[in-house]
C-alpha cells in the first residue's frame, strides 16, 4: 500500500505538528506533501521523511511570511500529484484537506479546524487594529473566493476525523459532513509531575503568538495582579506583545522541548485564555501534574475537569467565562484559594487518557475501517496495529 501524508506547512513544532509527527510514526515509509518546509524546524520523526513542497516554498521569504501567499494556497495544494497512492491522510487546519486524489484512493482528513482565517476568526486576523489597510483590503477581496473553494473542496474527502467535538461541530456546519472525534495526543514520556514543594512561584503560557490566543489579555491581567507569568512561544504578534510585556511578565520566545517540560513541571498553573480548537498544551500541563486555568470555551472543555463539576471526577483546573482581563484576574484569585484541591496525581491521571499510544491505535482503527469499506484492505490482510508501537 502506498501512503501519502499531507500537512499545510512544516515550519515548527506546534500542536498540529505533534499530531502529524504521530502520523509519520504510523507510516514511516510514506511520502509527505506540504506547501512550505523549513528544513530542521520539525522533529526528527518528520524531518527523516521524504518531503515534497509546493511552488510556494520557492517564493520570496515564504518561510517567514507564508501567510502573505494565502490566496495562492488552493492552487498550490491542488498541484500535488497523488497518482498511484492508495491512502492519502491529510492533517488540515488550512487547505490540506483540499488535495485532489484519484477516485480509487482513500482520502482521510484529520481536521484541526476549518480554515480559521476566513471563517470564525476573520476579525481576529484582519480586523482594524490587527492588520494594515492593504492587508484588510486584500482579505475582503479574497475571503469570499477562499470560502467558496473551501466549501467546494470539502467533498474531496472520503472520511473526516476531528480533533474535538468542538471542531466536529464546525465541520458539520461548514462542510455539512460528519466527523469522528479523535482527540490529539500528549507525549506522556516528555512530562513528569514534581512534588508540590518543588514548584516555582510563576504561572505559565505555552502558545503561538497569534491574535486569537489572547496573550495580551494574560499579560495585562498578570501585570495588574503583580504575579509572575512566563510565556513561551513565537508568532506574528511578537512585536506587539513584546511592547506590552513588563515585569513580572516575561516573554521567553521559543524554547527546546526539555526546557519547556521543566517549566511545565515547576509552574503553579498553565494559563489558557483563548478559545482553542482542541489544545494540546492543557494536556501537557496535566501530564506534568499541573492544573489549568482555562477559558470555558472550545476544546479545553473536553480535556480539563473544572472545579465544581459533578462528583466523582477529580478536578484538574478551573474555568472562567469570558476572555477579559477582569475575568482572568478573578480566576487566578479563585485558583489561589482553591490550590490544595487540585492534586498533581489527578492531573496526570487525567492526561493519561490522551496518551500517544491510544491516539495512534484509534487512528489506525479508523483507517482500517475506511480502507476495508473502500476495498483497499481485505479482511485477510494484516492490519495497521503493528505500526502503533
Image (cartoon, rainbow, N blue to C red):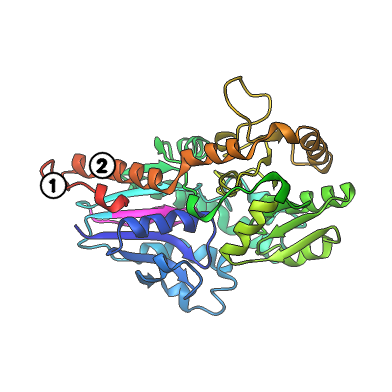
* The stretch drawn in magenta includes residue 95: yes
Q: Is residue 318 left or right of residue 193?
A: right
Mark in front: 2 vs 1: 1
Q: Residues within 10 Å of mark 1 (few under 14, many from 20)?
A: few
N-term mark: 2 or 1 = 2
Secondary structure beneath label 1: loop
Query: Which part of the image, by quadrant, shows the N terminus?
Result: bottom left
* Residue 294 falls in image quadrant: top right
Give the extent of the magenta segment: 88-102
Q: Is residue 231 visible?
A: yes
Q: Nearer the viewer, residue 372 or 58?
A: 372
- Mark seen at residue 52: none
Q: Nearer the viewer, residue 256 or 176?
A: 256
| Residue of label 1 | 381
Q: Position of residue 308 (x, y in %)?
A: 68, 24
- Mark seen at residue 370: 2
Q: Position of residue 147 (x, y in %)?
A: 51, 50
Compared to residue 289, the image places residue 145 above or below, namely: below
Q: Position of residue 72 (x, y in %)?
A: 49, 66
In 3D space, how far apart are the residues under numbered discs 2 and 1 (Cα atoms)?
Answer: 14 Å
Q: Is residue 124 visible?
A: no
* The stretch drawn in magenta includes residue 100: yes
Secondary structure beneath label 2: helix
Amino acid at each position: 500500500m502506498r501512503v501519502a501524508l499531507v500537512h499545510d506547512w512544516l515550519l515548527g513544532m506546534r500542536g498540529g505538528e505533534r499530531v502529524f509527527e504521530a502520523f509519520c510514526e504510523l507510516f514511516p515509509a510514506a511520502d509527505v506533501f506540504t506547501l512550505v518546509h523549513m528544513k530542521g524546524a520539525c522533529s526528527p520523526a518528520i524531518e527523516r521523511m521524504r518531503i515534497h513542497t509546493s511552488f510556494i516554498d520557492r517564493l520570496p521569504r515564504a518561510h517567514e511570511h507564508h501567510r502573505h501567499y494565502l490566496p495562492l494556497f488552493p492552487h498550490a495544494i491542488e498541484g500535488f500529484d497523488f497518482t498511484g497512492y492508495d491512502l492519502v491522510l491529510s492533517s488540515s487546519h488550512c487547505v490540506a484537506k483540499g488535495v485532489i486524489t484519484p477516485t480509487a484512493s482513500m482520502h482521510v482528513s484529520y481536521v484541526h479546524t476549518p480554515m480559521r482565517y476566513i471563517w470564525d476568526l476573520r476579525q481576529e486576523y484582519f480586523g482594524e487594529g490587527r492588520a494594515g489597510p492593504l492587508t484588510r483590503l486584500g482579505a475582503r477581496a479574497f475571503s469570499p473566493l477562499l470560502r467558496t473553494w473551501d466549501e467546494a473542496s470539502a467533498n474531496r474527502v472520503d472520511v473526516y476525523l476531528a480533533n474535538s467535538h468542538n471542531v466536529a461541530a464546525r465541520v458539520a456546519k461548514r462542510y455539512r459532513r460528519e466527523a469522528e472525534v479523535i482527540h490529539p495526543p500528549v507525549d506522556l514520556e516528555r512530562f513528569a509531575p514534581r512534588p508540590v514543594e518543588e514548584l516555582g512561584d510563576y504561572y505559565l503560557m505555552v502558545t503561538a503568538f497569534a491574535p486569537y490566543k489572547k496573550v495580551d489579555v494574560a499579560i495585562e491581567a498578570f501585570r495588574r495582579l503583580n504575579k509572575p507569568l512566563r510565556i513561551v512561544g513565537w508568532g506574528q504578534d511578537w512585536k506587539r506583545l513584546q511592547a506590552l510585556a513588563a515585569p513580572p511578565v516575561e516573554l521567553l520566545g521559543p524554547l527546546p522541548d526539555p526546557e519547556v517540560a521543566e517549566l511545565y513541571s515547576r509552574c503553579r498553573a498553565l494559563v489558557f485564555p483563548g478559545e482553542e480548537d482542541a489544545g494540546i498544551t492543557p494536556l501537557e500541563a496535566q501530564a506534568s501534574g499541573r492544573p489549568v486555568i482555562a477559558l470555558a470555551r472550545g476544546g479545553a472543555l473536553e480535556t480539563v475537569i473544572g472545579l465544581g463539576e459533578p462528583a466523582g471526577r477529580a478536578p484538574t483546573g478551573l474555568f472562567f467565562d469570558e476572555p477579559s482581563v477582569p475575568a482572568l484576574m478573578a480566576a487566578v484569585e479563585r485558583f489561589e484559594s482553591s490550590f490544595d484541591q487540585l492534586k498533581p496525581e489527578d492531573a496526570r491521571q487525567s492526561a493519561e487518557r490522551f496518551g500517544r499510544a491510544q491516539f495512534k491505535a484509534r487512528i489506525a482503527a479508523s483507517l482500517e475501517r475506511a480502507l476495508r469499506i473502500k476495498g483497499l484492505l481485505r479482511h485477510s490482510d494484516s492490519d495497521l496495529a503493528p505500526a502503533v508501537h
